[in-house]
Image (cartoon, grey):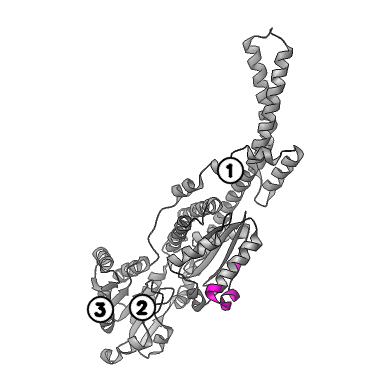
């Protein structure tokens, strides 16, 4: 099986392209099920900064073309112009870097790991993520844990939400006497509310389509929860708005925001949109009294933050390389073990036959101890014979060496496919669902 990654991110595509590929969860499941026709596996990762498809397939070219066709149908011809692709080990490296927050807009931010885990669980639920991608994701999550515990790349990291709050504080020279409205009480809204409270916001208001969720959030961080139906009444009195909902269309337009201009008497309004697709129509920013920012604007603001942790990021990159190499070695070993099992089965059958023939030829004059010694000698010869091939397969590097050696052994010893069928399949040794369940911790939604 070959690994492939195809997608767009903040590094390659403008927000307008990314938001066309940002699908609701139900739609993601439909796309996954189309892409993951057995034996192909598929994982769809969608965040405010990236949309990526990871595939494990016996034919990389066929899977790649199918994924490109899908992205084309969803995002149009412009999406194809901004795609990047990784194949083989490069795809694994990219997955490990993404999960470890080394490819994020905000280097070291903690939310991406939870988002990839959410995508993994959706893929498993859709039947699209099975053995190969389950093992790859479990290894990527383990790598991310190493990066967070063994480097300082995530310490004092600026998240998208905290960057938005810092920017608002800079614009208004502090938020002490400001009324701040948080629209959406999901993961990003919760982060924004916490950062706003820590920044000393004068009055914090949270609104959400489900009022109970807004009430639960303000019970933790402080502030006031208001019904979503009062949104534009609340907007009229706000100085700062941070919005991050799952709406497929903009909530704020030039028309409905502009209608508040007279009541506000020209009082400036700072709006930050952390949602993809966008909650704020770009035309809102053309109003003289509105300062509107989206996730691509936030990217410029956090550039210095990334540079400050470049040394830790380099160290983290070394850990990623180690973990990818470890995964590749284990994968090569799994590929080679069926051959070794067949070889051991053949060798043990020969040893048993020769021991029996020897014992028959020696008659009844041997004691039980002598018979057991001869039988033990047969087993020892088999073990010594297979020790070196087993050790060699465990030590091989990730560039296909394991497959080459296993194939050569099968050819030299004339091991047939019929013998392979008699050996239990590789997945039976360690159920991949259980492996991942031990590694994955469920997280909340991205908004």
Q: Which residues are magenta?
A: 73-86
- Residue pointed to by mark 3: 230
Name the foreground residue: 270 vs 418.
418
User: Is residue 55 left or right of 397 when viewed as pictured?
Assistant: left
- At label 2, counting other C-alpha atoms closer than 10 Å, the crowd grade (few under 14, some 14-19, many 20 or more) is many
Q: Is residue 83 above or below residue 39?
A: below
Q: Is residue 403 above or below residue 6?
A: above
Sequence-wise, the earlier of marks 2 and 1 is 2
Name the foreground residue: 358 vs 419.
419
Which image quarter: residue 288?
A: bottom left
- Measure the C-alpha gap from mark 2 to mark 3: 23 Å
Magenta region includes residue 75 = yes
Circle nearer the viewer, 2 or 3: 3
- Residue pointed to by mark 2: 168
- Residue pointed to by mark 1: 426
Name the foreground residue: 22 vs 295.
22
User: Is residue 424 left or right of 419 when viewed as pictured?
Assistant: left
Q: Is residue 20 above or below residue 123?
A: below
**Residue closest to the far right:** 412
Which image quarter: residue 265?
A: bottom left
Residue 344 drawn at (x, y percent) = 66, 33
């Amino acid at each position: 099986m070959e690994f492939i990654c195809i997608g767009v991110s903040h590094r390659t595509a403008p927000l307008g392209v990314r938001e066309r590929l940002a699908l609701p969860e139900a739609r993601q499941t439909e796309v996954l099920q189309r892409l993951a026709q057995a034996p192909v596996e598929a994982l769809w990762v969608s965040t405010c900064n990236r949309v990526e498809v990871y595939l494990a397939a016996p034919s990389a070219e066929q899977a790649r073309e199918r994924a490109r066709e899908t992205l084309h149908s969803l995002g149009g011809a412009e999406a194809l112009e901004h795609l990047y692709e990784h194949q083989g080990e490069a795809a694994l490296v990219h997955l490990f870097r993404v999960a470890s927050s080394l490819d994020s807009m905000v280097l070291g931010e903690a939310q991406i790991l939870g988002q990839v885990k959410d995508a993994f669980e959706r893929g498993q639920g859709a039947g699209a993520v099975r053995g190969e991608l389950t093992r790859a994701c479990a290894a990527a999550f383990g790598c991310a844990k190493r990066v967070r515990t063994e480097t300082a790349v995530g310490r004092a990291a600026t998240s998208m939400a905290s960057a938005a709050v810092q920017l608002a504080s800079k614009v208004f020279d502090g938020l002490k006497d400001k009324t701040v409205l948080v629209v959406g009480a999901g993961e990003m809204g919760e982060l924004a509310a916490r950062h706003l409270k820590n920044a000393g916001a004068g009055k914090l208001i949270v609104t959400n389509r489900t009022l109970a969720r807004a009430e639960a959030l303000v019970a933790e961080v402080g502030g006031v929860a208001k019904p979503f139906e009062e949104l534009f009444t609340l907007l009229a009195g706000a100085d700062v708005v941070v919005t991050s909902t799952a709406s497929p269309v903009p909530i704020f337009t030039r028309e409905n925001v502009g209608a508040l201009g007279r009541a506000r008497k020209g009082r400036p309004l700072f709006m930050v949109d952390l949602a993809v697709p966008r909650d704020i129509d770009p035309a809102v920013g053309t109003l003289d009294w509105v300062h509107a920012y989206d996730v691509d604007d936030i990217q410029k603001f956090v550039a210095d933050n990334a540079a400050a942790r470049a040394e830790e990021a380099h160290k983290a990159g070394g850990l990623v390389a180690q973990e990818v190499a470890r995964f590749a070695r284990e994968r090569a070993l799994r590929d080679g073990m069926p051959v070794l099992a067949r070889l051991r089965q053949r060798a043990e059958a020969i040893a048993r036959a020769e021991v029996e023939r020897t014992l028959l030829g020696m008659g009844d004059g041997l004691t039980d101890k002598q018979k057991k010694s001869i039988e033990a000698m047969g087993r020892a010869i088999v073990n010594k014979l297979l020790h070196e091939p087993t050790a060699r397969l465990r030590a091989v590097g990730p560039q296909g060496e394991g497959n080459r050696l296993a194939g050569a052994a099968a050819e030299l010893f004339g091991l047939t496919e019929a013998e392979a069928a008699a050996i239990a399949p590789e997945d039976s040794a360690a159920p991949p669902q259980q492996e991942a369940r031990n590694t994955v911790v469920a997280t909340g939604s991205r908004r």
